[in-house]
Amino acid sequence: VAPTIPVCEVPSSAMTGTVVELSCKETEGSPPSEYQWYKNGVPLLEKTGTGSARAANITYTMNKKSGTLLFNTVTRNDTGEYYCEASNGIGLSQKCSVKRMQV
């Protein structure tokens, strides 16, 4: 079953230095969807181990299975327009509407 449009939870504002979690979920897809977050239209990298992520100065953890995007300490650089995309290899992937987070 192809995924439906996911529900994205993105806070409209956040204080710098706080922990912020964005979530994305859809329940119709079978097999279960994987989720990809985008910021300002650019796909966010999944943090894998230490090497590449540290070099890219990544301050978040993205879990493709649960759809969460977790910032341990948000900075002003994390301000932007976020959306996520659900896909499970069946039918078209689905995106939620873009939401702006102001830090």
Image (spheres, grey):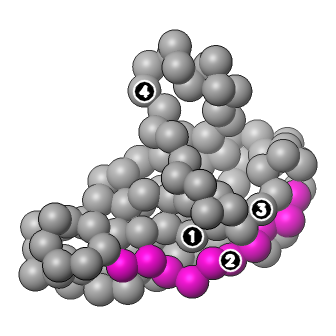
Q: Which mark is residue 99?
A: 2
Residue at 25% over, 78% down: 92
Q: Which residues are magenta?
A: 94-103
- Which residue is at 42% across, 69% downward? 85
Nearest the viewer among 44 and 17 is 44
Residue 72 higher or lower than 15, as above or below: above
In the rendered image, which residue does mark 4 sit on? 48
In this rendering, the answer to whether 93 lies above or below 28 is: above
Q: Position of residue 10 (x, y in %)?
A: 65, 71
Across and down, in percent, residue 32 comes to: 18, 66
| Residue 65 on the magenta segment | no
Q: Which residue is mark 1?
A: 83
Which labelled disc corresponds to residue 80?
3
The Cα atoms of the two marked residues, 3 and 2, are separated by 8 Å
**Quick one: label 3, few (<14), some, or many (20+) residues within 10 Å?**
some
Q: Image point 34% across, 69% down: which residue?
A: 86
Which amino acid type is marked by label 4? Thr
SS at badge 4: loop
Q: Amino acid at mark 1?
A: Tyr
Lateral position of residue 50 relative to residue 33, left or right: right
Few, some or many residues within 10 Å of mark 2 (<14, 14–19, 20+): some
Q: Earlier in the sequence, mark 3 or mark 4?
A: 4
**Foreground of the two, 55 or 41:** 41
Between the C-alphas of marks 4 and 2, the distance is: 26 Å
User: Circle 3 — which element?
Assistant: strand
